[in-house]
Amino acid sequence: MLGKIRESFRHPFWQAIYLLVLAYLLFDFGIAYLPPLFGIRSAPVPNSVVFQFTITALVGILLYVSDNEEKWSKFKEPINAALVDADKRWIRIALIVVIPLAVGWTTYSRVRPSVAAPVQLRSIHPAPPRSISFRGGTIQLARLENPLRADGSTEEDYEAGMRVYYQNCLPCHGDLLDGNGHYAHGLNPLPLAFTDNGTIPQLTESFVFWRIAKGGPGLPVEGAPWNSAMPAWEPILSEDEIWAVIIFLYEQTGWTPRTWGEAGEGGGHE
Amino acid sequence: MNKWPVFCLALSAFLVPTAGAAGQDVQAGQILYDKWCAGCHGFDGAGDGYAADYMLPRPRDFTLGIYQIRTTSNGSLPTDEDLVHVIDKGMPGTAMPGWEAKFSSSQINDVAAYIKTFSPFFEREGAPDPLEFGRQPRREGIAEGREFFEQIECFKCHGDAGRGDGPSAPTLQDDLDFPIRAADLTENWNFNGGGSVEDIYRRLRTGMDGSPMPSFSDLIDAQFMTEEQLWHVAQYVHSLSPEEGPTISDVIVARRFEGDLPASPNDSLWNQAEAFYIPMVGQIIADERWFAPSVDGLWVSAAHNDEQLALLIVWHDPSESPDPKWLEWQQSVAASMFPLLDSVGVTPLPDRLTVQFPTSIPTGRDRPYFLMGDARNPVYLWQWSSQGDVVPEATATGLGNVQPRRGESRTLASSAVWHQGEWRLQFGRSLATPDSEAELQFATGELIPIAFYAWDGSNGEQGSQRAVSSWYGIHLEQPTPPSVYLSPVIAMALTVGLGLLVVWRAQRREEG
């Protein structure tokens, strides 16, 4: 038995089969689960991509088994035997039953009616306005720096921001600032994870001020659909409280805000 | 990510002499604690951080040295492993998250060492050895567990069906006189100390100190029951929850019925429609905000027959409000939460539930603002109150901007039953109505936005103080087109034909 398996490693047909299975396993599971073993973040590959990758691998394998005449005819041997040999009759019948069943099932699962909510694509960092109204006044956003950083008492502002965060932001954005507070599971879209490098490190503090002050309802048209539960904090938090909680967000996550030099006029990233 | 704090911590681990037990660095623990824990538990560990008035149950007060989740006997301090375990895993059903993904085990050890310094008891007495819990008996004894569930009077707080609706439930307070819920034993994913049989058995043996949950170890000592019998109680309690916790689906599928729809909330026809779980959270967006919602989830089933749509909404609520027995609870919740409200806790309030739709099926991707719509995009509401004091249909253009719809042509019907801590509410309406301007016209095959609000009157909830959901979608099934069955058959026939052809040709070639 063992000898037979070892022998099969040298046979082009079985080599092709093993390679194909290995490639499929690598695409479907390997990409998702191997990198985390080395501390690298990864995610499962979508089925359609696995399918594409596997087809590509199949083409490569066919090129390999057909690169010379001898290998190619050896590759075809077991296939021909299964089709022709009298003692392989049952394999033949099994294949003629199993393959159509698989095709039927695949067809059925493709045409059967299923419902899924459409993916809600939205622009992550819509361009901010040049100025916003705030509690009756006007705030120019372009080139605006966090005024609390000017007087150098960051520690006090951090503490003030901590209070604001824990009394207002915590239930959704969470203790770990990872968007996984104890209310997060009830929200769709999910609260933002400030720990992600695609969030606040890409933004100027004035952009963050705008998003906190105006929330989901204040998103511009290109930011639609604004199906976000993020409230507009303008009626609840004062200007200083918003600037303080911004200091807290950056201190707590260890990110630094984007500066106007790198951000250009928009303040968001393109 | 700024690596400096971590580096400094690592460095200080070498430089600063360890003050706690072996390998524990109290000072490093303090730095982490002040940054990550003090917001809730307070800088002096008294459970009075900034967020303390904004959650129920409140953060633990470490100065008392009283801990719920232990492996030690009733009334004792927890072991270091107990503290580390809770920090690692968090406490399900509360605001306490698990920290194991964020911090290394030595950092968590340090935090545990620092937490112990808040209470003089740790230095004075230290923790005793953990109890011997043994192993779960191989034989499952759920029926026997149920007998002891009655004998040792679990139902007094947790209720006969385990939904936290026992006769004592409205009176429960913790050691600091804050209101505390009897756990809903049918939702083990919310058990503070974990939902496995082993977890439950440990809570039964150690009690949950600081809460009304007693230890039952003394009943074993007094030979009233054996350890095995207490294991059976744990098995019984575990059996009250579903095998798997709820999963959240974006879409509620309204099953298409040929003929009659279920006639009442308890109609067995409802078994044919799948129930979808909708998580609910407090309304913390607009004044008055609500940080202590009672309803944490709904199970929604839907059915239609091309004429009528029926919705069944099932949720757990330990009280059939308005109920004067819960007035004290209502006052006690109001007193412990921010903001302090004068209006709450004076009179018993009804339970309420509202279903929200847009007034018409959206053509684009935009939906009305999820919290009661907005000026440009109104919402259409189905309202129900346990006191019948609400107009069933309404439209709204924002919180506090509700316009009831009165008139002859109303076709919305609702009926509800409360039994052992569970509401079952059925709504029914014809798919089409005369007023197609303000009332949603249901169509099959479309994804129609739907959202929910729930109020537990006995918890002091009214007006904006409610539990809310995000938008979900409801899809009314269409009859299956015959092509769904035809296409696979054709595909299979073609494949068989092709296969036979290949075999036939190969054999011909062989013979030739």
Image (cartoon, rainbow, N blue to C red):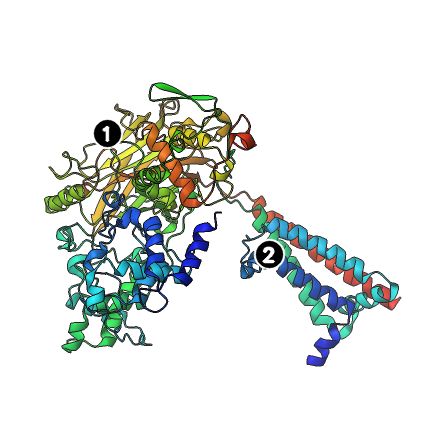
Q: Quadrant of residue B452?
A: top left
- The mark total stands at 2
Kind of element beneath mark 2: helix
Residue drawn 74% across the image and 72% down it: A9
Furthest-right residue in view? B512
The amino acid at mark 2 is Ile
Q: Nearer the viewer, residue B385 or B184?
A: B184
Residue B95 image offset from top left, x and y in percent:
31, 49
Q: Nearer the viewer, residue B472 or B292?
A: B292
Q: Distance between the Cα atoms at labels 1 and 2?
A: 56 Å
The amino acid at mark 1 is Val
Answer yes or no: is residue B489 visible: no
When the figure is inspected, residue B180 is found, relative to residue B220, above or below; the finding is above
Residue B55 image offset from top left, x and y in percent:
26, 45
Q: Chain of mark 1?
A: B
Q: Which residue is mark 2?
A: A31
Q: Which residue is mark 1?
A: B391
Residue drawn 29% across the image and 32% down it: B286
Kind of element beneath mark 1: loop
Q: Say yes or no: labels 1 and 2 on the same chain.
A: no
